[in-house]
Image (tube, rainbow, N blue to C red):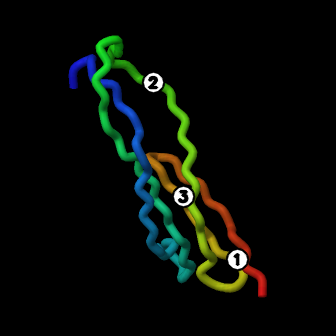
Amino acid sequence: MDGNHRPVITGVHASERFVTVAGSNEKVARIELTPIIDVVTDPSYKSSDAPFEISFNYAVKAFSWGSNDLVFVSGNREERIVLSQRK
């Protein structure tokens, strides 16, 4: 890509699946977030790393009563949370 094309994030793709934790019967919901990238022509842009921030609202649902483990993954970053569902 030449230096006149600035990358921009136009959206986020979310993929959900259940995975079993190695060595146990525990299941966790794995939610993978992948940015959708496009480019815009910008004669002033010079190819370089550019910091960015993005907000993505995503509703999650409990998959059983009690504690529900969810793992959010984007690139090499993982964040695990517990969503509690009470009766």
**Residue 23 rendering spot, x and y as whole percentages:** 51, 76
Q: Residue at x 50, y 27 (%)?
A: 51
Query: Which quadrant would the N terminus be assigned to in this image?
Result: top left
Residue 27 against residue 41 in the figure, above or below: below
| Residue 64 point in image, percent of width and height | 63, 84
- Mark sitting on residue 50: 2
Indicate the amino acid at tag 3: Phe
Q: Is residue 73 above or below residue 55?
A: below
Between residues 31 and 2, which one lies in front from this camera angle? 2
- The image shows residue 8, relative to residue 10, as above or below, that is above
Q: Which mark is residue 72?
A: 3
Measure the alpha-carbon separation of dots 2 and 1: 38 Å
Q: Nearer the viewer, residue 24 or 33?
A: 33
Q: Secondary structure at mark 2?
A: loop
Query: In the image, what residue type sits under mark 2?
Result: Ala
* Few, some or many residues within 10 Å of mark 1 (<14, 14–19, 20+): some
For badge 1, the amino acid type reads Ser
Q: Which residue is mark 1?
A: 67
First along the sequence among labels 2 and 1: 2
- Contact (Cβ within 8 Å) of mark 1 with mark 3: no
